[in-house]
Amino acid sequence: MSLNDNILIKIREMRDSLTPVERMVGDYILENTEDIPHLSIKELAQGSKTSDASVLRFCKTMGYSGYRNFIVSISASLGSRDEDPKAQYTDIQPGDDLSTIISNISLNNCKSIEDTLSVIDRKEIARAVDLLCHSKRIVFFGAGASGLICMDGEQKFTRINKMCHAYTDSHSQLTAATLLEKDDVAIFISNSGATIEIIDALEIALKNKAKCIAITKYNKSVLAERADIVLSISTPEITIRSGAMGSRIAMLTIIDILFAGVASAEYEHVKKYLTKTHNILTNKLRY
């Protein structure tokens, strides 16, 4: 099964953006996953305390034309999960030995990438790459851990001679947003999509008619609702800092995808910059 077909992950990640009735259907499915493939549409409606029409609307919201296709996808997702029963997010517990920590962190990071590929919209990625290819300037906005992702993006796009900069503190973000123009692309990075400083900069960027791309987990956040393009990530719902680690890995993956997409689309133009930057860094490391 293709990673981006995992409907169970998609339901979990889209939960907060569903209507109350759709959420009732989604919650029932997530709580009774093993039973769902055997239920008729009427039985699922009764179990979730909704209606046949509500279940059908839920299926369409998830991207399926009908109930049968939806159930087939549920079965495939369950089959994929059964193939690797240990592939679940695991939090780090006080007193864990180093071997356990190594295994759990590695697994969580791998799962973050896999689950992000399950929820990401390929068409939105294509739109984002196209905007970046035609941008006059690229500006990254992020605070805290998300600021590190911005710096990584700045470093990558600088290598192909894209005019770009990362802003990670509130004052410089407001200043940078104020100077944006319609041919600029602003990339806002926030796991919650609700960071006050990021939203303030977003509103200014939109007023200046810059194109805004959001990299975030929550599709119902202010950031996701206001941005022109939303690139969703999936991260574990666990308690200790391994959750933040997972979100960082997922966001870095999105940055890598965007960079590679732009570099590939403009390869004949940017290959000389890639060669130059590679050579200068290699030569410096020799001394």
Image (cartoon, rainbow, N blue to C red):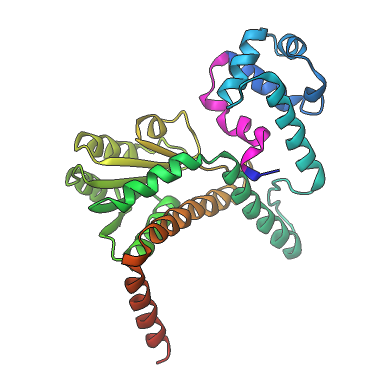
Residue located 59% across and 51% down the image: 113
- Helix, strand or loop: magenta stretch: helix
Q: Quadrant of the C terminus?
A: bottom left
Q: Position of residue 199 (x, y in %)?
A: 33, 36
Camera sees residue 235? no
Instruction: In this rendered view, identify the residue nearer to me: 196 or 282.
Output: 282
Q: Quadrant of the N terminus?
A: top right
Give the extent of the magenta segment.
Answer: 4-20
- Above or below for 269 versus 246: below
Camera sees residue 224? yes
Q: Position of residue 122 (x, y in %)?
A: 50, 42
Instruction: In this rendered view, identify the residue nearer to me: 212 or 169.
Output: 212
**Residue 82 falls left or right of residue 242:** right
Instruction: In this rendered view, identify the residue nearer to me: 259 or 26.
Output: 259
Q: Quadrant of residue 73?
A: top right
Residue located 62% across and 21% down the image: 59
